[in-house]
Image: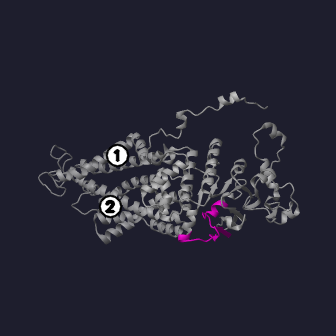
Amino acid sequence: MNTADVILKVEDLKTYFYAGGGLFSQKKVIKAVDGVSLEIFRGETLGLVGESGCGKSTLGRTIVKLYEPAGGKIYFDGQDVTALQGPKLKQFRKDVQMIFQDPYASLDPRMTIGEILKEPMTIHELYQNDAQREQRAVELLRIVGLKPDHIRRYPHEFSGGQRQRISIARTLALDPKFIICDEPISALDVSIQAQIINLLKQIQEESGLSYLFVAHDLSMVKHISNRIAVMYLGHIMEIGDSHELYLHPMHPYSIALLSAVPIPDPVEGKQKHPEPIAGELPSPLNPPMGCPFSTRCPYADDRCKREMPALKEKNGRMIACFRVE
Amino acid sequence: MNQTVTSEQGRNLFAPLSEDEKNNEFIAVESKTYLQDAWAHFRKNKLALISLYFLLFMLLLAIFVPIFSPYSYYEQDLTMTNVLPCAAHPLGTDKFGRDIFVRIMYGARISLAVGFAAAFINLFIGVIYGGVCGYFGGRLDMVLMRFADIIYSIPSMLYVIMVMLVFGSNIFSVLLAISVSGWIGMARQVRTQVLSLKEREYAQAARVMGAGHWRILFQHLISNSIGPILVNMTLMVPEAIFTEAFLAFVGIGISIPQSSWGSMANEARSLLQSHPIQMLWPVLAISLTMLSLNFIGDGLNEALDPRKR
C-alpha cells in the first residue's frame, strides 16, 4: 500500500500523566504511552492488544484528542492534527469518532435515544431541520438493528448490547472516516460480542471506514482486524498481519500473550503446553530500564536490560526485540 | 471426547425462530422520564407527601386569606385587644387588636417569598459558579473556590447587619443579605458533582463529537446533577425562612407594621406571661413550615437518588 492510503499516522507519540507532587514529594511521571509510531490504512482495521494498564486505551484517547500528547505527532488524512484548535478541530471531531468501553456509562441517562442520536447532528449543523435529523436518527437505529419507536426511550431501558448498538449509531451519525473502538465488547456477553463485531464489520464493508480496535480479547481481535499491534507498557512490541501474527508470533511478549488465550477444546488445550508469563506488569511509575519486557522475558540478557530495542521490519512485520534482529 | 452431531439432531438443534422471538427487541416496560420515576417514589413517602400538601395549603392560605379577610394586617382595633380565639378571630387578636390569623398569613407570604426567592438566587449563582469551577478545574477552580472560602469565612450575621445598615430594612435587603454567602454551599455541591461527572464516558463522548464547553456543562453535567441540586435547594428554603424570622425577631428585618413570623414572636414576647397563646401561633407557623420543608427535602433526596431507596 502506498502512503496516500494512510488515513492515520502516529509518530513517536507520548502521553504522560503526572501523579503526586505535594509540598515534600516530587511529581512522578507516568509514561502511559511512550514513543508509539504506527500507521492505519483506509478501510483497514488495526487491532491493538495488550494487558490492562499497558496504555492501549490511552493511546486511543490521545488520538481522538481527549488527552494532550506530551510529544510526537498525529497526522490524519495527511494533515497534522496534533495541535488543532477551533473550527479545524471541530472538523476533525466530525471525521474521527470513538466507541467507548462501557455502554452503561457512555449514554447520557437523562436523554432519550432520539436526543442522543440527534445531538452530534445538531452540533455540526448537519441537516436543515429537526424533522430531517429525526428521520436520520430512525435510519441509524435501523442500521444497528433497533426499532424506530425506540427513539423515545431512555438508555436505562436497554440491555448492554442494545446500548452499545446505540452508541455505534451515535458515532455513525457524523459519517466519520475513522472510528476508535475502545474495548467496545469487553463489557458484553460472548454471544452479544459476536453481534457487535459483525455489526462493526458490516458497517465497514458498506462505508469503507477504518477502525482502531482496542481490546484485550485476542480471539475477537483476530476476527475483526487486518493487522494487529501488540502493546506493552507504553511501547509497541510487534505489528503484523493478524493471521500471521496469530499463528507465528515472533516477539517473546506476543508469544506469551497468545499462549494465554484459552482453547475451547480440552484435548488440544492440554497438548499445547502454555507458557504463562511470569510476574506482573511493572508499575508504569517505575518502568524498567531498557526493554520494558526484560523483567519478565525468558530470553532477556544484559543488553535488553540496558537499551530499548527499536521497532524494525522483519519478514513484513515490525518487531521491537534484539532476538529477531 | 468428541461428540458427533448427526444431521437429524442438527436440524432439531437449530430450529427456526418463532414469530415472537423475532420480536425480541421489543421493550415491554412503560417509558418513564427521570422525574416521573422520582415522583412515583416520592409519593410512597407519606411524611414527605403530607408535608408537601401542608405547604401547598399554606401557600394558598397565604395568597387568599389577606385578600378575602375583613381585617387587614395593619388596622388596629383598640376595643378588641388580646382576644382569645373565637369565631370572628380564629387565632385571636394581638395587643393592638389586629387579627392574628391575617397577620400570620401575611407573614407566610413574606417568609415563603423570602425562602423561595433566596433559594432561586442561590441556585442561579451556585450552579453556574460551581459548574464552572468543577468543569474547567485547575488554577481557575483554585482561585474561584478560595475566593468563595474567604466569603464563607466571615460570619453571615456580619453581612446581614452591614447590608441592613446600608440598604435599610426591607424585603430586598433581607434577600441580599441571605444571598451574599448562601450560594456557597450550592456551588461546592455542584462543583463536586461536575468534577466526578465530567470523567464519565458520556461527557467524553460529547467532547469527541465536538460539543462545546457550555453544551457539555449544561446539557450533560448539570442536568445529571439535578437530584442533589433540587435537594440542596429545598433545604435552603427553610434556612432562609429561619434567617428572615431571626432578623425580624431581633428587629432588623421587615419594617413595621408589616408582619413577619419573627416580628410577631418578638411582639408576643412582652405578653408571654399574660397571653402565652399569642406566642404559640408564630412559633407554630415557623416550626411546621421548616419541618415540612425538611421532610420534603428528605423525601426528594430519597426519590432522586436511586442508591438511597
Quarter of the picture holding the N terminus of chain B: top right
**Residue at 75%, 53% in the rendered image:** A242
- Mark 1 lies on a secondary structure that is helix
Mark 2 Cα within 10 Å, few/some/many (few <14, many 20+)? many
Query: Is there one chain holding both mark 1 and mark 2?
Result: yes
Tell me: B233 left or right of A230: left
Amino acid type, callout 1: Leu
Can residue B82 be seen from the camera position used here?
yes
Q: Residue B296, percent across and down?
A: 39, 47
Can residue B188 be seen from the camera position used here?
no
Look at discs 1 and 2 and give the one toward the viewer.
1
Q: Which mark is residue B52?
A: 1
Say which of B160 and A296 sits in front.
A296
Residue matched to label 2: B247
Mark 2 chain: B
Say which of B158 and A270 sits in front.
A270
Q: Specify start and end residues of the magenta stretch as a single range.
A: A59-88
Mark toward the start of the polypeptide (1 vs 2): 1
**Is residue A138 shown in magenta?**
no
Q: Residue B139, percent across and down?
A: 55, 70
Q: CA distance from mark 1 to mark 2?
A: 26 Å
Residue B269, above or below B7: below
Amino acid type, callout 2: Leu
- Mark 2 lies on a secondary structure that is helix
Mark 1 Cα within 10 Å, few/some/many (few <14, many 20+)? some
Say which of B99 and A148 sits in front.
A148
Q: How is the image coloured?
A: one colour
**Is residue A86 shown in magenta?**
yes
